[in-house]
Image (cartoon, grey):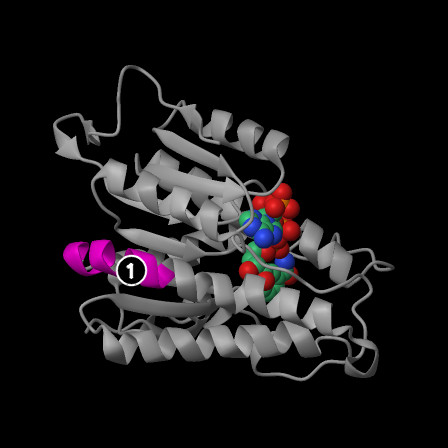
Amino acid sequence: MDLKFEHGGITNTQITKGTLMPTALITGASAGLGQALAEALARRHWHLVVDARGRDRLAAAAAALTSETTVDAYPGSVTDPRHRTELVTAVRRAGGLDLLVHNASELGGSPQPGLADLEAATFAQVLDTNVGAPVQLTRQLLPELASSGGTVLAISSDAAVEHYEGWGAYGASKAALDHVIGTFAVEHPSIRWYAVDPGDMRTQMHQAAFPDEDISDRPLPETVVPTLLRLLDLRPPSGRYRGADLAVDTTAVVHS
Ligand SMILES: NC(=O)c1ccc[n+]([C@@H]2O[C@H](COP(=O)([O-])OP(=O)(O)OC[C@H]3O[C@@H](n4cnc5c(N)ncnc54)[C@H](OP(=O)(O)O)[C@@H]3O)[C@@H](O)[C@H]2O)c1
């Protein structure tokens, strides 16, 4: 079901102050990094298509964005093909897509089991959420992304390249996500493709990953958003980036 949060008579024609509004689709935008990025793009008056599974939290997050922009919010899981089609339909109704953010993610248990104890269904669920669904959603939206010369931003993790006890399923899924983003990049070079490791952030997912730890020393997800915005603004070559490098070393971002 579509929760609509249009305001001020502005509709999906995407016209505000005489200029075309860019459109972003952000998965998992009711909390954490997805919500923080949605808020930042709303302040830039991007039209937003957002989702998350929890209806009430998504409705609250979307309602908070409407003072800045227009929002189409769809409760559902990225793993549900019918829900993905809802998102694609919303994008097409908006007239196109400039940015697709694969942010929604599944940890695979709290605490996360070692591989010896990992149920097949859990492994499949983590892979489906973190890489299967992003691939399918991307495939469906390739025409819109090619038409706009748009950007795909996949939120990765250091667990994609490091090996930590209990992080086998999640790490494998993020490694696979990095890989498919790199392959899309060579297959569709008119689109920019980024896999970004944002670093540790003080979020619900991080607390679930470290259930017995006080995570109050971890940075808030809002601190990563300027890095992501700089990436989107500068549009360096497609590739895998670490948020920490982009944040402190601007030479890491090179114009193509
Ligand atoms: N936090 C960290 O330290 C950290 C470090 C490295 C990478 N990351 C990555 O950063 C991204 C954001 O993580 P976060 O820490 O901000 O997480 P978070 O605070 O737990 O937020 C996750 C968001 O995704 C939604 N979501 C989860 N599963 C979904 C699904 N199947 N379909 C649609 N929406 C779904 C959640 O809402 P519902 O639960 O209502 O669906 C929520 O809005 C993830 O890709 C994560 O892997 C995080």
Q: Nearer the viewer, residue 123 or 19?
A: 123
Furthest toward the front, the residue is 82
Q: The residue under label 1 is which amino acid type?
A: Thr
The magenta-colored residue range is 138-148
Element type at mark 1: strand
The residue at the point 48 percent across, 37 percent down is 74
- Residue 76 horizontal side relative to residue 21, left or right: right
Q: Nearer the viewer, residue 18 or 76?
A: 76
Dominant secondary structure of the residues highlighted in magenta in the image: helix
Q: Is residue 73 visible?
A: yes
How many residues crowd mark 1 within 10 Å: few (<14), some (14–19), many (20+)?
many
Q: Is residue 89 left or right of residue 29?
A: left
Q: Position of residue 118 (x, y in %)?
A: 78, 75
The outermost residue toward the top is 8
In the image, 67 versus 131, the foreground residue is 131
Is the residue marked 1 within 8 Å of ligand 1, measured from its CB? no
Query: Mark 1 — residue?
Result: 151
Q: Is residue 199 visible?
A: no
List the single residue furthest toward the right.
212
Q: Position of residue 59 (x, y in %)?
A: 54, 28
Locate residue 171 relative to residue 62 in the image: left or right: right
Residue at x-position 46% and y-position 47%:
82
Q: Is residue 80 magenta?
A: no
Which residue is at 19% across, 61% downward?
146
Q: Residue at x 26, y 74 (%)?
A: 237
Marks counted in the figure total 1
Locate residue 163, reporting x and y percent.
67, 84
Where residue 186 appears, as percent x and y from the top left, is: 26, 80
**Residue 189 sits in quarter:** bottom left
Magenta stretch contains residue 145: yes
Of the 4 image quadrants, the one containing the C terminus is bottom left
